[in-house]
Image (cartoon, rainbow, N blue to C red):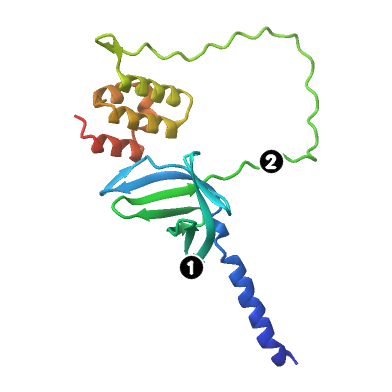
Amino acid sequence: MWRRLLPYWMLLAMLAGCARDDGTRLLGHWRAERAEVMSLMLPIAPELEITPTAMVAANQMQVPITALVQDGAAVTIETSAGIGLVFHFVEADRMYVEFPLLGRFYYRRVQAPVPLATNAVPAAPLPKQAPVTPMPAQPVVAPSPPKLNGKTLQWDTDLQQARLAMQQARHDDAIRHLHVAFEHGFRDQAALNTTKEFAAIQDDVRYQVLLARYNTK
């Protein structure tokens, strides 16, 4: 009896395997780790939000999706313009996409926050204490940027944004602002190495690539 049913069980197993390989592993929010462009590793690439119907880059550009096709560790996004983008998975939550003449862009999945349990036992109330008058919070104020011929230097505004991001422990944003500062003409590596806010990212490979990319002295 079981021998006659064996082909049916095998067919069901094959269908179950195909159902898992439908490209849905690509859905979600992806943040760029780095981009390999012309043999250089840069920290800049647009974030991606991929849904069954569209891919949104940098919260602005939206590309309609007509199909998701999975082939092993690769998932192809087919668009209404007839263009296919192939994403290659190197880990469960890490993948890259390669563009001709541009290079590879590596991404890691942004995990959704875990919701708090609704049936948690409430903590015992703390004993009442005398009210304490809170001190007003002191805002973080960046120093005034230098001026040239009465005009504020653009790169210094970017540099101050990077310092504020470091003070708030937003390292990814700090590196992005530093990259923009370099593009606007900033080249003072000595100032970066002696600024205490940037000490926490001096060993970051993305920070080191920026210095090498712009050949600062």
From the viewer's side, name the closer residue of 42 and 198. Answer: 42
Looking at the image, which residue sits at the far left? 217
Residue drawn at (47%, 64%) of the image: 73
Image quarter where the N terminus lies is: bottom right
Q: Which mark is residue 115?
A: 2
> Is residue 191 positioned above or below 67 on the image?
above
Q: Position of residue 50 (x, y in %)?
A: 53, 50
Residue 115 as seen in the image, left or right of residue 122 = left
Q: Of callouts 2 and 1, which one flags the residue occurring earlier in the amino acid sequence? A: 1
**Displayed quadrant of residue 215:** top left
Task: Using the image, determine if residue 13 lies above or below residue 169.
Answer: below
Q: Residues within 10 Å of mark 2 (few under 14, many from 20)?
A: few
Residue in the image at 19% along x and 29% along y: 217
Disc 2 and disc 1: Cα gap in Å?
33 Å
Nearest to the eye among marks 2 and 1: give it: 1
On the rendered structure, is 165 left or right of 152?
right
Measured as percent of width and height from the top left, residue 204 is found at: 36, 37
Residue 198 horizontal/vertical position (percent) = 36, 26
Q: Residue at x 49, y 39 (%)?
A: 60
User: Which element type, helix, strand or loop, lies under badge 2?
Assistant: loop
Amino acid type for the residue under numbered disc 1: Asp
Left or right position of 70 against 155: right
Place of residue 92 in the rendered image (x, y in percent of width and height, measured from the top left): 51, 57
Q: Which residue is mark 1?
A: 71
Res. 152 image quadrant: top left
**Mark 1 secondary-structure assignment:** strand
